[in-house]
Image (spheres, grey):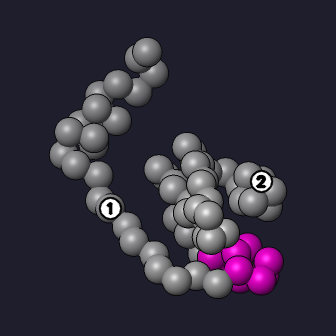
Amino acid sequence: MRQLKKLKIYNLRSSSDAEGRLTVDVDKFSHNDGINEVISIILKGGGIISSISTTDPSLEDVFVSLTSNGVK
């Protein structure tokens, strides 16, 4: 997990269950190759990836991202 935290990932969240399985949630990467880096770190660390899923942002998410740039 330490190696993942070194990557430029926005909103990295992780959790583990009673069986030791780790779930990693990422909102977005700072560059297009981010998912490949995450997979590489997990595999090099001896981890086994059992599933990967992606979710596209909603139109509302895209609109808010584009229109609220710099506004808090």
Residue found farthest to the top: 72
Q: Which element type, helix, strand or loop, lies under badge 2?
A: helix
User: Would residue 51 be seen by someone viewing this image from the given angle?
Assistant: yes
Residue 63's place in the image compared with 3, above or below, is above
Q: Residue 25 carries which label?
A: none
Could you tell me how many numbered marks the image carries? Answer: 2
Quick one: label 2, few (<14), some, or many (20+) residues within 10 Å?
few
How far apart marks 1 and 2 lie (CA) works out to: 23 Å
Q: In which quarter of the image is the C terminus?
A: top left
Q: Which residue lies furthest to the left in this view?
A: 59
For the N terminus, the quadrant is bottom right
Disc 1 + disc 2, Cβ < 8 Å: no
Q: What stretch is highlighted in magenta?
A: 39-47
- Residue 54 within the magenta-colored segment of the rendering: no
Please give the name of the residue rendered at 20% of the width and 39% of the height, measured from the top-left corner.
Answer: 60
The image quarter in which residue 23 lies: bottom right
Residue at 77% in and 53% down: 6
- Is 50 or 20 nearer to us in this picture? 20
Q: Which amino acid does label 2 sit on?
A: Lys
- Residue 49 location (% of width, % of height): 58, 82
Mark 1 element type: loop
Judged left or right of residue 61, residue 36 is right
Q: Name the residue under label 1.
A: 55
Q: Where is residue 47 in the image (x, y as percent from the top left)?
A: 71, 80
**Apparent side of residue 4 relative to residue 58 in the rendered image (left or right):** right
Query: In the rendered image, which residue does mark 2 sit on?
Result: 6
Query: In the picture shown, does residue 63 fall above or below 37?
Result: above
Q: How crowded is mark 1: few (under 14 residues within 10 Å), some or many (20 or more)?
A: few
Q: Where is residue 30 in the image (x, y as percent from the top left)?
A: 57, 52
Amino acid at circle 1: Thr
